[in-house]
Amino acid sequence: MRFRPIALAATALIAAAATPVVAAPPRAERTVTVVMADRHFHPQVIRLNRGQPYRIVLINRDGTGHNFDAKGFFGHAEIDSAGAGGQAVAKGLISVPAHSSVMFRVTPMSAQPFGLSSSTALDAASGMQGQILVY
């Protein structure tokens, strides 16, 4: 018996249509820790993947408050509004009091570089600047 190419293509299409589609499992949350000390962010460049959920922990080791000012980044991300994430939704920055830590959850949605700074008096001028690179 001889098969025609059209009959083979139709058979393949029917088989593909009958194959169940399995949804991809949700991506596991990753934790990124950013330390604020000596008027610097450590690390100064934060590398994240688009679509990957993150738990960001901000630790301020200084005796003065700082903030994590990343309005562009927060404008291109899904932010869990619980906890400190509510600050980001409202203002585009997270305030971190002296000698404390703050946590928020975020999923970057746009692959591009974003500026990061602390807009607290004298922080940016003293070098408290960085980048968030989303790939």
Image (tube, grey):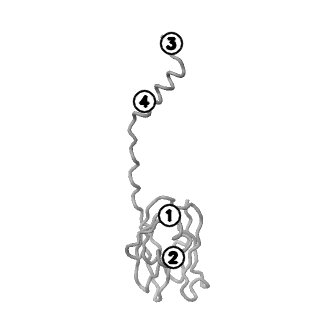
In the picture of the structure, the residue carrying the numbered disc 3 is 2
Q: Amino acid at mark 1?
A: Pro
Residue of label 2:
92
Which residue: 59% across, 63% down?
Answer: 112
Label 2: element kind: loop
Tell me the amino acid under the disc marked 3: Arg
Q: CA distance from mark 1 to mark 4?
A: 37 Å
The image shows residue 99 at horizontal and vertical percentages of: 41, 85
How many numbered discs?
4
Of labels 3 and 1, earlier in sequence is 3
Cα separation, mark 3 vs mark 2, equals: 67 Å
Residue type marked 4: Ala
Front position in the image: 122 or 94: 94
CA separation, marks 4 and 3? 20 Å
Residue 15 is marked as 4
Looking at the rendered structure, the secondary structure element under dot 4 is helix
Q: Earlier in the sequence, mark 1 or mark 4?
A: 4
Q: Quadrant of the C terminus?
A: bottom right
Q: Which mark is residue 108?
A: 1
Horizontal side of residue 76 vs 82, given as left or right: right
For mark 3, give the secondary structure. Answer: loop
Residue projecting furthest to the right: 125
Residue 67: x %, y % from top left: 50, 81
Q: Is residue 7 above or below residue 70?
A: above
Locate residue 56: give its quadrant.
Answer: bottom left
Q: Nearer the viewer, mark 3 or mark 1?
A: 3
